[in-house]
Amino acid sequence: MRKIINSTYITLDGVIQEPQHWPSLGSFSDDGGQAQWEVLEHCDAVLMGRHTYDIFVPVWTTLSGDPLSDRMNSATKYVVSTTLTDPEWNNTTVINSDPIEAIRELKQQPGADIAQYGFGPIAHGLMAEGLLDELRLWVHPFFLGKGSADDLIYRPGSTGRFELADTLTLKSGIVILTYRLGPN
């Protein structure tokens, strides 16, 4: 069965929203780029919500000629959305109803693992159903000092148990904590 591997940027105060507006720490430096590649090299599909899709499209569609960009752009992409009808990013399929069941079926299909970006309703739903196999938190070494409850990784009612599998400290000071689904 395919694994779903979530990769999420987070600050020390738990903020996950709008990382494109955070202070730059070089997450795409050589060691950060290698860590990004390690997520995608064993995946042949990418899963995201509409918000993440809208952030990724203008960035990734302008990049090419390197293994990471080429892999991201050629991968099959699944976007959970009830409003996206004509995705502009190649190889994109919209999941517009019963996302948990659709993703459960994706996990059963043959293929490599699935990278999932962003930690919103989809990730929380996957976690609640035991479908999120691995969580890679890219902990940025600063407090953002602003944000609403919707900007935080925490959501009322979310539960899940994970076991620490690996840590990696980047030259920038970002620490990547890799957790795997543990016993409930």
Image: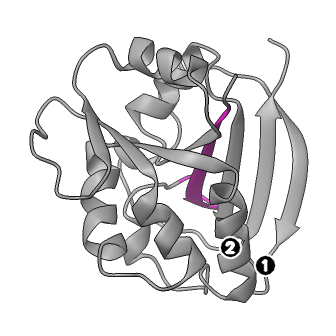
- Is 8 contained in the magenta span? yes
Residue under the image location 66 percent in, 29 percent down: 2
46 vs 174, nearest the viewer: 46
- Tell whether 166 sits left or right of 124: right
- Residue highlighted by disc 2: 141
Give residue 85's quadrant in the image: top left
Q: In the image, residue 175 lies at what x, y percent?
A: 77, 67
- Tell whether 13 sits left or right of 92: right
Residue under the image location 17 percent in, 49 percent down: 87
> Neighbour class for label 1 at 10 Å: few (<14), some, many (≥20)?
some
Quarter of the figure with the C terminus: top right
* Location of residue 122 with respect to 6 vertically, above or below: above
* Location of residue 128 with respect to 27 vertically, above or below: above
- Residue highlighted by disc 1: 170
**Marks 2 and 1, how far apart in space?**
11 Å
Q: Bounds of the magenta span?
A: 3-14
> Neighbour class for label 2 at 10 Å: few (<14), some, many (≥20)?
some
Three-letter residue code for mark 1: Leu
Q: Secondary structure at mark 1?
A: loop
Residue under the image location 35 percent in, 49 percent down: 148
Quarter of the figure with the N terminus: top right
Three-letter residue code for mark 2: Pro
Residue under the image location 39 percent in, 46 percent down: 77
- Is 6 contained in the magenta span? yes
176 vs 17, nearest the viewer: 176
Of the image marks 2 and 1, the number of the one nearer the N terminus: 2
Q: In the image, residue 60 lies at what x, y percent?
A: 36, 72
Residue 89, visible in the rendered structure = yes
Q: Majority secondary structure of the magenta segment?
A: strand
In the current view of this chain or complex, which residue is farthest to the front? 110
What label does residue 58 carry, if any?
A: none
